Amino acid sequence: PIGHHVTIGIVKEKQTIKRNYTPISDEEGHFELLIKVYENGIVSKAIHDLKVGSRLYIKGPFGNFDFLPNRFKFLGMIAGGTGITPMYQIIQAVMSNPNDRTEISLLFANQTEDDIILKNQLDGFASASEQFRVHYLLSKPSKHCELVGRVTSSMISQFMPNPSTSDFLILLCGPDGFVIHNMNILTGLGYEKSN
């Protein structure tokens, strides 16, 4: 279901190591995962090194958020790096449903231009409809970009719904430090945890 993830486990040195991944597709009978291979990533490297016919242990789906079309008028999304995958799952569902009028604003933070995954797809959604807007933030840009540095309160105020309005939800996903940093900003701006 949209808004849920799966858990993949690998066995290494008699120990099971698990990581959660959000499918980026929602087609009956199969799903697709987008997995970035990290240099020190035990699970991502193991998945990358699998041969055709290998077995992979997957459990799920799991999750506390059930996405429903038109449930909110506005979705604000703040993603860091591979934290884009749960956002992309929802963006794709909204943009492929002509009856879903949910407006989405995505603030997508990465280090460099080369780190931006799914950029072509996101740009395609943004150019196809004013219902979806994407704002790229880079901490180490090699050329001019819209936003530079870390997420700030002024960026959130500019691109996310005002906390005094109703009928919105802010979704946040990324590395732990990224999430903590942005939760502190959101709280300081007056956003409630229920949003």
Image: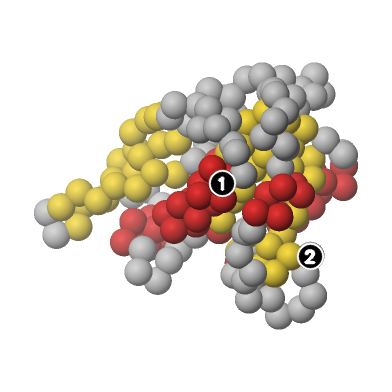
What residue is drawn where x is 77% and y is 32%? 103
What residue is drawn where x is 53% and y is 27%? 194
Label at residue 188 = 1
Q: Residue furthest left?
A: 14
> Which residue is tagged 2?
146
Q: Position of residue 29 (x, y in %)?
A: 52, 27
Residue flagged by tag 2: what amino acid is it?
Glu
Q: Is residue 12 left or right of residue 118?
A: left
Q: Position of residue 135 (x, y in %)?
A: 75, 55
State the residue in front, 185 or 39.
185
Q: Is residue 76 left or right of residue 192?
A: right
Label at residue 92 = none
Q: Position of residue 5 (x, y in %)?
A: 45, 36
User: Can you tell which quarter of the image residue 105 is in?
Assistant: top right
Q: Secondary structure at mark 2?
A: loop
Residue flagged by tag 1: what amino acid is it?
Gly
Q: Residue furthest bottom?
A: 142
Q: Is residue 177 left or right of residue 182?
A: left
State the residue in front, 21 or 87.
87
Q: Position of residue 190 (x, y in %)?
A: 60, 39
- For the C terminus, the quadrant is top right
